[in-house]
Image (cartoon, grey):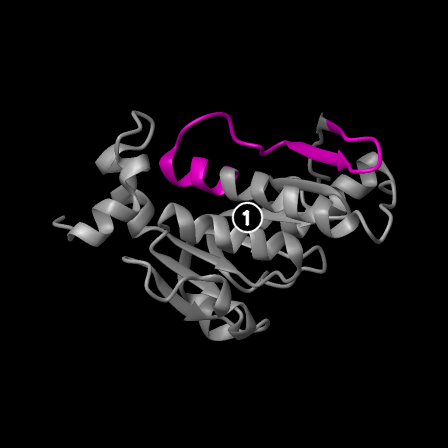
Amino acid sequence: MARDDAYVERYSRQLILAEIGPRGQERLAAARVAIPARGAAAEHVIAYLAAAGVGTLAIAPEQRALVDPDQPGIQVKTLPRHERDDARVGFDAVLVDADAAGDVVRARRRFWIADGRAAETPPCHDCAAAALGAPAAAPDTLAPLRDALLGTVVATEIVKAILDVGAPLTGRVLTYDATTATVTTTPVAARPACPRCAAA
């Protein structure tokens, strides 16, 4: 696909990477990601995916300011929190809240961030909580920073999923304790009767 000079200049660092290159950048440009989740983690996912050149981002109206309107090749679609019209539209990935917001959105891959934890479903947040127990609470001053870091991690996982590179986070839960600056990754299986994991 022909691209103009602004596109090439914007993504030049990715275009020369062996792991991405022109073909990978086209895959990112053709990708569609829905982000009905809210908060610091979701904001960092949006900013990261926009910077990477993901072609279509379906986000809440108040999150549109996170995407540079002059960035070439990006389409921003409004996705209200409970937009059921988009249940008919498939996405490459979706970031959902722990409270199941976004479950109506069909997507090839499903990711979540909650309470200092992140994963690709399966397991879902509820299965992670059942297996790992209650997460350590972060002080109010550290929680947004913790969530921002996890947003960057999950955005990276989404890019990996689009490009089909690296090992996916599915079947494992990443936990970041901001108080002790420790990261752990724990294998977690979906509960047999979990409908959210079964739908993933």
Place of residue 42 in the rendered image (x, y in percent of width and height, measured from the top left): 60, 55
Query: Of residues 176 and 79, which is closer to you in this image?
Result: 176
Left/right of residue 4 with respect to residue 114 in the rendered view:
left
Place of residue 58 in the rendered image (x, y in percent of width and height, measured from the top left): 45, 64
The residue that mark 1 highlights is 110
- How crowded pointer 1 is (Cα within 10 Å; few <14, some 14-19, many 20+) is rated as many
Is residue 5 shown in magenta? no
Secondary structure under the numbered disc 1 in the rendered image: strand
Depicted 112 relative to depicted 12: above or below = below
Q: Which residues are magenta?
A: 157-183
- Asked whether residue 92 is in view, the answer is no
Query: Of residues 49 and 126, which is closer to you in this image?
Result: 49
Q: The disc labelled 1 sits on which kind of residue? A: Arg
Place of residue 73 in the rendered image (x, y in percent of width and height, measured from the top left): 28, 57
Place of residue 139 in the rendered image (x, y in percent of width and height, measured from the top left): 87, 48
Left/right of residue 192 with respect to residue 93 in the rendered view:
right
Left/right of residue 118 with respect to residue 83 in the rendered view:
right
- Asked whether residue 177 is in view, the answer is yes
Depicted 177 relative to depicted 142: above or below = above
Q: Residue at x 59, y 60 (%)?
A: 103
